[in-house]
Image (spheres, helix red, strand yellow):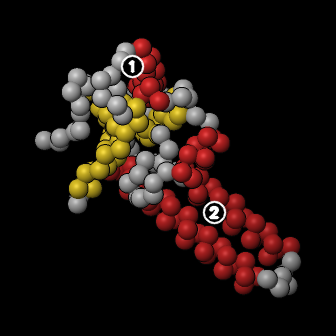
Amino acid sequence: MQTYPLQEGEEVLWAGTSQRPRKWFPEYTQMIAITGLVVFLIVLRRHFSGWSLLVGAYVVLFGLLLQRASDRRARDRAMSYLVTSHRIIFVASWPNGTEFRWAWLPYLLLPPRVKADASGVGTISFGGWWSRVQFREKELRGAWAPPVLELRAIADAANVAKLIVQTRHRAATTTYTQAP
């Protein structure tokens, strides 16, 4: 049985994990575009003097993007999420232990954004692209760390986002005896 760090008076409203690993990554699209550019340069200028430098840069970029995709898949397999009456808890269950991170609902300043497919499986993120980039620069690092506040590939993402908004409004109007 999994033990979660719930505080007195806190109840779990929703719990879930990633439904499936992502099968198509933006990194692959970038690699296809770079491959097309390399082929175009080779066809356009057969005597391109920096060809070996370009191929070397391509190999390095491919290695970096492949590692990033591998880290994301591992994180998606390990992550589970809890929405409680006071916070969102991110749980990473690795073979060598379980790690917890959380965000207090009253301090979530931005509304959740939902990107879901037709089956309802989707990602809930908080804030726009620029705010997530700024937050990513300030977060603690680690393969298990949730990148920004995202609940990735969860079932029924739209209803979970509504639950978070309702709970956040309720948590903002009530007082909590323990400081976050």
Give whichever of 117, 140 is nearer the camera: 140
- Looking at the rendered structure, the kind of residue marked 1 is Ala
Residue 129 lies, in percent from the top left, at: 63, 41
Residue 180 falls left or right of residue 124: left
The answer to whether mark 1 and mark 2 are in CB contact below 8 A is no
Few, some or many residues within 10 Å of mark 1 (<14, 14–19, 20+): some
Q: Earlier in the sequence, mark 1 or mark 2?
A: 2
- Residue corresponding to mark 2: 31
Residue 145 lies, in percent from the top left, at: 41, 52
Assign a secondary structure to mark 2.
helix
- Looking at the rendered structure, the kind of residue marked 2 is Met
Q: Quadrant of the N terminus?
A: top left
Residue 118 lies, in percent from the top left, at: 49, 29
From where the camera sits, is residue 20 visible? Answer: yes
From where the camera sits, is residue 117 visible? Answer: no
Q: Is residue 83 above or below residue 97?
A: above
- Residue corresponding to mark 1: 171
* Residue visible at 60% across and 74% down in the picture: 60
* Residue visible at 33% across and 22% down in the picture: 176
* Residue visible at 75% across and 71% down in the picture: 39
